[in-house]
Amino acid sequence: MNQPIEKITIIGAGALGATYGSLLFEMNPEAVCFIAGGDRYDKLYSGGVSVNGKHYTIKVVRPEEAIPADLVIVAVKHYHLDQAISQLKGAVGPQTIIISVMNGIDSEERIAEVYGLDKVIYGLTLGIDAVRDGNAITYKNQGRILFGEKKNTEMSDRVRRISNLFTKAGIAHEIPPDMIHSLWFKFMINVGVNQTSAVLRANYGTLQCSSEAKNLMDSAMMEVIAIARTQNVALSVDDLKEWYKVLETLNPAGKTSMLQDVEAGRTTEVEMLAGTVIQLGKRLGIPTPVNQKLFYELTRIGKA
């Protein structure tokens, strides 16, 4: 099946969903829509989204109004995934491809439990420095989407179709040879960077130059590396070095999504980050004292 992807549905209109929605809208306003329910529907329907100062009135439909799409992009917070999976039902048809750009290492499996692994493409984002204020998103570095099958020694038909769409829309992307390694790499980054930034209230500029921040990031990420190796995922210190190359490209005034959540009083993804590391560490007999400390601090902040 080589026909182009023409209808895209996005669930989640935060920093990632709005950014990619705006780029797809610029390509073709008729090609893209958001799914949203309740108050979120009302806000998007009446106010649209703003990306880098430009206002977009992207079509928004309620879950019960959704029709099958060629591609569904899942861009919600981890704690909203179960609700999103339920709300996607109308958008998923026999030929629909689903790509998650969420943080974490299990969203694809959770989506596949409902819709089938044959519908799911692995995905993540890397290097975007978007800041969200309500429905307004600003970014200097778009970063890129990494996506593909588990292994991409040869490009599958559906990966090629998504790549063609992203190229047409100006969405920077990359197809790694090993997506499971890439997912763990991103998880390692989130565990170190998001949590450190939130605990220290540090923007990217501080993370780029603070030895305190670097030491905390490194310590948290080394715990992920130890766990990943037991799962036959070859993360190493070289991956830490790769992350610091990405960090240097980010807008110093930019902030991680978790820091933005803390500052806005929103729920954080600490359960999915430190919580997962602690749980896996206990199961595998691997000490995780740094993530236990981060979990405690972020849970305390969330209750303050």
Image: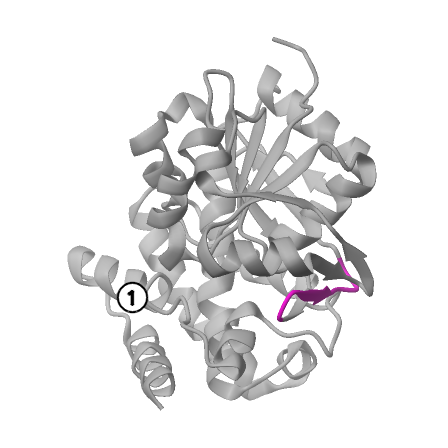
Image-based side of 194 in relation to 279, left or right: right
Observer-nearest residue: 136 or 250?
136
**Residue 35 in magenta stretch:** no
Q: Residue furthest bottom?
A: 304
In this picture, is 70 found above or below 300? above
Q: Where residue 23 appears, x then y in whole percent?
A: 76, 45
Q: In which quarter of the image is the C terminus?
A: bottom left
Name the magenta segment's main secondary structure. Answer: loop
Image-based side of 229 in relation to 92, left or right: left
Q: Residue at x 58, y 86 (%)?
A: 211
Q: Residue at x 57, y 22 (%)?
A: 153
In this picture, is 184 found above or below 98? below
Observer-nearest residue: 98 or 292?
98
Q: Can residue 150 be seen in this view?
A: no
Q: Is residue 71 visible?
A: yes
Q: Quadrant of the N terminus?
A: top right
Which amino acid, mark 1? Gly
**To which residue does mark 1 refer?**
275
Q: Which residue lies furthest to the top in this view?
A: 1
Q: Where residue 227 appears, x then y in whole percent?
A: 32, 56
Q: Quadrant of residue 214?
A: bottom right
The span picked out in magenta is: 134-141
Q: Where residue 156 appears, x then y in whole percent?
A: 58, 18
Observer-nearest residue: 215 or 134?
134
Image-based side of 71 in relation to 274, left or right: right
Q: Which residue is drawn at 48% across and 53% down?
A: 76
